[in-house]
Image (cartoon, rainbow, N blue to C red):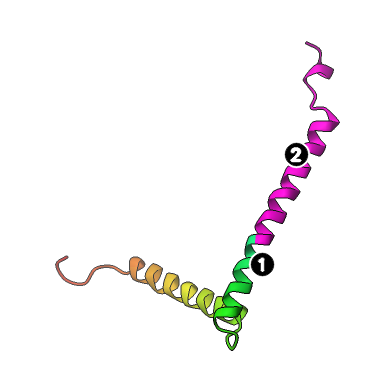
Amino acid sequence: MSKEDKKESPYEQVEGKLDTIDLCLHNAQKEIAELVRRMKESPEVCPDEQDGDKAIQDALDNFFINDLLKQKPIGDA
């Protein structure tokens, strides 16, 4: 086989890009549906604020856990 036979055809490149776009659109539809559900459950609470608070708490938890793992044990462990 020559090098030209092994090259990916332009059709396959476009098909791959379309598959990626389809996947991104599908994920966006799921995220929008989840956001709408959350807003209907509690309209007085902003989902972005909830997500931000959760992200901050997760970051703090990870920081303190890593800090504890770096410390040497005290006494006979």
The secondary structure type at the circle numbered 1 is helix
Q: Residue 32, labelled with which disc?
A: 1
Q: Please identify the residue farthest to the top as the structure is shown.
A: 1
From the top left corner, tell me how far across and down residue 53 is, in percent.
Answer: 53, 80
Residue 67 magenta-highlighted: no
Disc 1/disc 2 C-alpha distance (Å): 24 Å
From the top left corner, tell me how far across and down residue 15 is, in percent.
Answer: 78, 37
Q: Residue 16, labelled with which disc?
A: 2
From the top left corner, tell me how far across and down residue 41 is, in percent.
Answer: 55, 80
The secondary structure type at the circle numbered 2 is helix
Figure quadrant of residue 32:
bottom right
Residue 21 magenta-highlighted: yes
Front in this rendered view, residue 43 or 72: 43
Is 22 located above or below residue 70 in the figure?
Answer: above
Task: Identify residue type, mark 1.
Answer: Ile
Task: Identify residue type, mark 2.
Answer: Gly
Front in this rendered view, residue 40 or 45: 40
| Point 77% across, 43% down: residue | 17
Front in this rendered view, residue 66 or 57: 57
- Bounds of the magenta segment: 1-29
Density class for disc 2 (Cα within 10 Å; few <14, some 14-19, many ≥20) is few
